[in-house]
Image (cartoon, grey):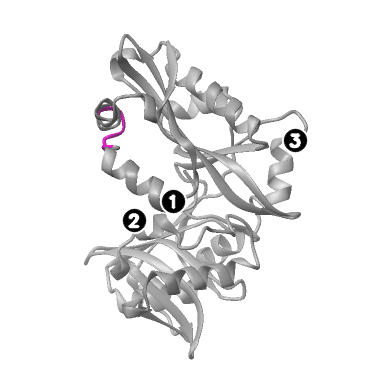
Amino acid sequence: MEILEYNDVDPLKVMYLTQLALDFALTPEMVARIRQSDPRPFPFLAIYAVENDIVLGQVGVFRLPMISTEGREDVGGIWAVSTHPEYAGRGVASRLLEEAHTRMRETGLRFSTLGTNRYRVAYNLYRQHGYQETNVWAIALAPWETVHQPTRLRAQPLGTDGYDFVDKIYMDIAQDYLGFAWRYIPFARLRRVVNSSDIWILRENNRVIGYALTSSDQTMLTISNLVLQRNIDIAEATAAVAAELKSEYVQVKLSRPSEITSLRNAGYRVTHPTWDAFMVKPLVPEVTFEDAQERFGIGTDRFLISWLDTT
């Protein structure tokens, strides 16, 4: 089994592998867009296990910017882990993970992170390789009648202000947080995967206090990310969005203890933790999982995380 980088393998074989294993196609065109617009991937983008000219598996490697109690600190990010189904059980993913961790260490990174689901087979593999669950994610669900309440806040569509305006809001608010509180601007993934029509700006009088990323139909309004100033009640912010996007039910993805408490007190049914997993692995013996929790505020109200920033 040989370990090669993206530039050294057939990109169409990579596309076939990812479509087969992940149900999404990492096409050459997508790779070109990522490399052109997103500075977070390592220069080699991903590593591959190859045998007899067959691409057996893939592990992508990111360098993710974070903020710790001591300032800026980048961490590793594992993404798009995939194994060809015909070669499962041969240690392909394990070999690639070990290589990815080695390359992270060589660049001075002290922690690696990844996002997954606890019900996936790969979850136990990650645990075997030293990743630990942080249990930060929660889901709140309520009927519209519970969500709707008088609020001093109002939600407005992004309109012509554009993605640059969202970037500015994020960076202004993130100054009060740890974790994923720093982004390369312009933030490429926001533009790549979120439609501008799904972004709602939250205001208190004329003052911008945050934004929401949404999807909705008549049955369900889903708020997948709320970025709010720390003194803003999430129940009020959700009510403001729900007033504009009326659905029978509202679901909110959240991560901070005060948000969980707020929505529980407002009558939401809150599940914590969910199947979603954000996992952390120390890469060097000088640090521990507990060090990561303390440095980045993981599990506290100061920890800022979204599905856009993780891998």
Percent x, y of residue 164: 43, 71
How many numbered discs? 3
Residue type pointed to by label 3: Val
**Residue found 69% across the figure and 46% down from its top:** 293
Helix, strand or loop for disc 2: helix
Nearer the observer, disc 3 or disc 2?
A: 2
Q: Amino acid at mark 2?
A: Arg
Which residue position is annotated with label 3? 287
Q: Identify the residue at the far left of this view.
A: 218
* Residue at numbered disc 1: 38
- Residue in the picture at 65% in, 38% down: 109
**Numbered range of the magenta stretch:** 20-25
Q: Secondary structure under badge 1?
A: loop
* Image coords of residue 213 (percent x, y): 39, 65
Residue 16, given in percent of the width and then of the height, sits at: 24, 28
**Mark number for residue 192?**
2
Dot 1, how many residues are within 10 Å of its Cα: few (below 14), some (14-19), or many (20+)?
some
Q: CA distance from mark 1 to mark 3?
A: 29 Å
Residue 115 is inside the magenta segment: no
Residue 165: x %, y % from top left: 44, 74
Q: Upstream in the sequence, badge 3 or badge 2?
A: 2
